[in-house]
Amino acid sequence: MDKPRSPAVVAFWEDFRRARGVPEQAYDVCRMGDDAALADGQPRAIWRTKTVEVKPLDGVDEAFGWDEGEGERTREDWLAQHTMYFERRARAEGFTFDASMPAVFERFTLVWPPEYADTESS
């Protein structure tokens, strides 16, 4: 979900730009998660998208479940956790959830802060 550019976000982006010599450019701000514990609006990382694939949520494969690096790192656990998330979003936003709905599967490389740089994730 898009988030406004708080002073903390702007400072985080500017630190990255100065350190890496990145020119002024547009950027998106988003959060992962749907509660304050997961998505408190404080900047944590900047990533560069490597690939994007749209397919049914239940079309997730073992590699994607492993690469995300959370939970049991299995397809089954990934699907169970994301099903719970999307069921909550469906209730909150008033749509009917179905595991065969299209989902965006993004693979990215973390580029900032330096301790995360060049870490691949899903």
Image: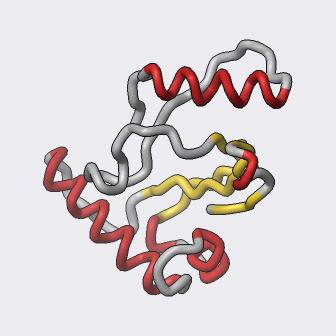
Image-quadrant location for residue 44: top right
Q: Nearer the viewer, residue 24 or 63?
A: 24
Quadrant for the N terminus in the image: top left
Residue at the farthest right position:
21
User: What's the residue at 45%, 66% (across, down)?
Assistant: 57
**Residue 102, percent across and down?**
45, 56
97 left or right of 54 in image = left
User: What's the residue at 74%, 24% (across, down)?
Assistant: 17
Q: Nearer the viewer, residue 15 or 23?
A: 15
**Residue 10, percent across and down?**
54, 21
**Scheme by which the image is coloured:** secondary structure
Please, is residue 41 above or below residue 118 in the view? above
Q: Nearer the viewer, residue 24 or 122?
A: 24
Residue at the farthest top position:
24
User: What's the residue at 45%, 73% (across, down)?
Assistant: 58
Quadrant for the C terminus in the image: bottom right
Image-quadrant location for residue 90: bottom left
User: What's the residue at 24%, 53% (across, down)?
Assistant: 89
Q: Nearer the viewer, residue 24 or 84?
A: 24
86 left or right of 5 in image = left
**Residue 88, percent across and down?**
21, 59
Please, is residue 42 above or below residue 102 in the view? above
- Say how many tags the image has: 0
Please, is residue 95 above or below residue 99 in the view? above
104 left or right of 112 in image = left
**Residue 53, percent across and down?**
63, 55
